Image: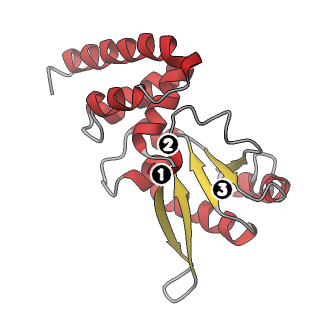
Amino acid sequence: MKRQQFNDILLKVAKESKSKLIIIGSQAFFAATQSDKIPEIVEMSDEVDIFPENISDVESIECKIGEKSEYFDSYGIYAHALEDIERHMLTGGWRERLVPYKIKDGSHGAEYEVLCLSLPDVCINKLCFGRPKDYDFVSNVVSNGHISMKEIESLAGSVQSKYKNILGQNIEKAKELILRRAGADGGN
């Protein structure tokens, strides 16, 4: 998904929703940076994970903009509405680090604001889950200079205790992947 597609789907969701929206997952990257250097792993995704604070919006979002919607059939991207954000948020204080992201409806239209998970929080969550695509995401955003491993590691202490051991192991795996990629790229 490109930035414009991200903006388009957020505008659609914001118009449909009656509540504050929080974006989690790799697409939160767009709020974290205005850089034109978008990692390929971010653009490969066809899904935006969205938590509407008004739970009654979940069904509406899924029906109108979800994976089985006409919107997905037309545009090839979709919104996945989450009912429970707490099981996805693994760090303490994540709400204080949310990044506001504004979308305008045309040149003179209404402006909407959604909140996006901070890039360090996204990376920590991905490393707790530790799927291959999660390592790819973290290594890409670190290798492209959007965040440092030091920033990720500094947040690691705020992770729920049940994830601390796996997070430590997965941080080391991510570092190894970053080093291998740097070696394959000739250190660039």
In the picture, the disc for residue 96 is 1
Amino acid, disc 3: Tyr
Question: How would you rate the neighbour count of disc 2 (Cα within 10 Å): few for under 14, some for 14-19, many for 20 or more?
Answer: few
**Frontmost residue, 111 versus 40:** 111
Q: Quadrant of the C terminus?
A: top left
Question: How would you rate the neighbour count of disc 3 (Cα within 10 Å): few for under 14, some for 14-19, many for 20 or more?
Answer: few
Q: Is residue 184 above or below residue 48?
A: above
* Residue that lies at the very extreme toward the bottom in this rendered image: 108
Amino acid, disc 1: Glu
Amino acid, disc 2: Gly
The residue at 29%/42% (across/down) is: 146
How many marks overall? 3
- Assign a secondary structure to mark 2: loop
**Frontmost residue, 99 versus 186:** 99
In the picture, the disc for residue 187 is none
As drawn, is 169 to the left or to the right of 114?
left
Q: Is residue 43 above or below residue 161?
A: below
Q: Is residue 130 visible?
A: no
Residue 32 screen position, x and y as percent: 39, 51
As drawn, is 15 to the left or to the right of 121?
right
Q: Which residue is mark 3?
A: 75
Marks 3 and 1, how far apart at CA: 33 Å
Q: Which residue is mark 2?
A: 93
**Frontmost residue, 154 versus 13:** 154
- Assign a secondary structure to mark 1: helix
* Residue that lies at the very extreme toward the left in this rendered image: 187
**Frontmost residue, 73 versus 141:** 141
**Which is nearer the N-term, disc 3 or disc 1?**
3
Marks 1 and 2, how far apart at CA: 6 Å
Question: How would you rate the neighbour count of disc 1 (Cα within 10 Å): few for under 14, some for 14-19, many for 20 or more?
Answer: few
